[in-house]
Image: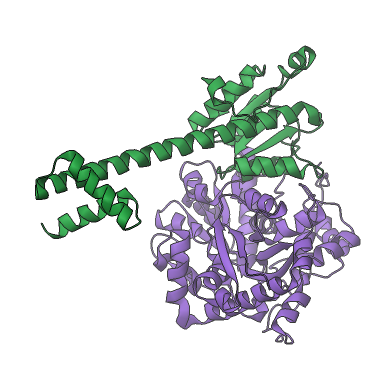
Chain colours: A green, B purple
Amino acid sequence: MAGSLKGPDSSQPGSSPAGELRDSSLKIVIVDESPIRAAILEDGLREAGFMHVEKLGDTHNLLKRIYAIDPDVILIDLENPSRDVLEHMFQMSRAVKRPVAMFVDQSDSASIQAAVDAGVSAYIVGGLKKERVTNILDLCISRFNAFARLQGELDRAKGALEERKVIDRAKGVLMRAKNYSEEEAYALLRKTAMNENKKIIEIAQSVLTAAELFK
Amino acid sequence: MSVETLRIGFIPLVDAAPLVVAADCGFAADEGLSVELVREVSWSNVRDKLNIGLFDAAHLLSPVAIASSLGIGHVRVPLIAPFNLGLNGNAITVSPRLHDELTAAGDGDIADPLASARALARVVAERKARGDDALNFGMTFPFSNHNYQLRFWMAAGGVDPDEDVRMVVLPPPYMVDSLTNGQVDAFCVGAPWNSVAVESGVGRILHFGCVIAARMSEKVLAVREQWAGAHPDVVAALIRALARAGTFIAEAANRTTVAAALSRRLDVPAELIARTLSGELKLSRDGKTRGDSRYILLGGDSTNRPDPVQAAWLYAQMARWGQTPLSDELCAAAQAVFRPDLYDLALRRAPAPHDGGPRDGVGAFAGPDFTADVGAYVAAWRAQRSGRPRLSLVR
């Protein structure tokens, strides 16, 4: 399943065997209220050799749970208001075993832009080498984008289904009113749409509105 | 002037009013501006999207604009604040149980912040003696007035916010739930969340923020310094649109219109917003109310003209609580974030004299008058923490 989700921009972290060995020990926490997206991301991370991945769906007692897991990397979706809770960790290093800092540094505006565009934010333990998490962030960005594409396709499919229903009902109205066959009813809708330079769905909607008025 | 659409980020709070009114009541259009207000869910998002240029401007916590410019806690991106969107507007709400404990421990009326802070010190000591868990206080962001107001208040009574209680960040929409399920015992947040807690009976408003300090810059319009330099005419037009919106909001006769506009953008009932704007809030479910004309200030020169004294005071809070080192250079840099010069330039007039505000520009309920000599000011506070370990700097 994960393979089919990979876009052309998908990257492969841990390309060297030594890198995989080293990175597999990183503990990663995903904070995401969308269970599907979190699963897609977890899948990708495991595939790339990261064995310690935990998902936090709800954000109740978030800090306490994160301290208990003691992660090296935290990934959080930007639609999550609890991002501000994570920011607090910068300011309370005494309460945290290890301070956490945002991944991006000042020279890295391209990667922060790509991450924000994709809707994900990453925090890492201070002192972790940047190259070690670049792969993780790239993977997140591509998975988040893949999820957005999937969501978009799903929305379009739902929309198409709705349109089909409206057109079917309009055909039914015409078939009853004019004693048309289904083909003739559809042909009339299509011809009217072409003449008026409109979409079939718009004409079908007008037919239904008119039928409602004449009831 | 460029007529491209300005993308402006905001958090759904009452003090986004000047932006909402400017965008939705025609003041921005009058200045030839097209404005798209983009609703956000966290201050981190607003800051990051402003920093990387996804937003041209933003409704921002005043301390975040300073922290970002000084590079405290995050990437350093110089921001400027040419317009102050709001003064005050917060309140401290406590659980009914903590309210009872404070009343019992108080040796005076706990409506007085010094009396309530001393009562809190006694409650904290009693809990410690019993071996109870420390009290939890919710606030909205490390760099926020909510954080600083809670700290200022409890420290005046002898409570060390870093040692004696736990300060936790919570997104405002989660505050009321967290008070209900006991995750926090009190919180400091902006409108309308204190009223929501009161209405549902899980909290009692203890103090308005304006009682802790009479004049605190709460939210600013923030833009990147670099962007402002490249688009001076757009900045000036935006300031004029916001200033006219501010004047409109300050007029009590327009309250219904303002509440309706905010209601559409915030998804909060207009009636609740109108009550907030009036400064007359219900304190507890039994219907007791308290009014204060300074509760929330959104319009007029004395509110909207950025005041560098406010920036210095916020910087002093950051230094006092160890978020940043203390230095005159950093204080000057913080003050330079607030830009009354751009405000005056845009409105092409000399600012009106202050309307009887506090003599030191802040009006805090305890401690010495504020002075631009932040070193001496912070030292005076630290001297009061007798017998306690000095704060260690974070990071």
> Residue, x 74% and y 18% (percent of image)?
A15
Any part of residue A58 in sight: no
Q: Quadrant of residue A41?
A: top right
Instruction: Depth check: give the residue in front, B183 or A161.
Output: A161
Which quarter of the rendered picture does the C terminus of chain B lie within? top right
Which quarter of the rendered picture does the N terminus of chain B lie within? bottom right
Q: Position of residue A4 (x, y in %)?
A: 53, 22
Any part of residue B382 in sight: yes
B245 above or below B150?
below
> Residue, x 44% and y 57% (percent of image)?
B196
B124 above or below A4?
below
Q: Position of residue A61 (x, y in %)?
A: 56, 35
Q: Quadrant of residue A69?
A: top right
Instruction: Depth check: give the residue in front, A196 or B119.
Output: A196
B173 above or below B134?
below
Instruction: Depth check: give the residue in front, B240 or B136.
Output: B240
Q: Position of residue B12 (x, y in %)?
A: 53, 58
How many callouts does the rendering have? 0
Q: Quadrant of residue B133?
A: top right
Q: Position of residue B231 (x, y in %)?
A: 74, 68
Instruction: Depth check: give the residue in front, B77 or A214.
Output: A214
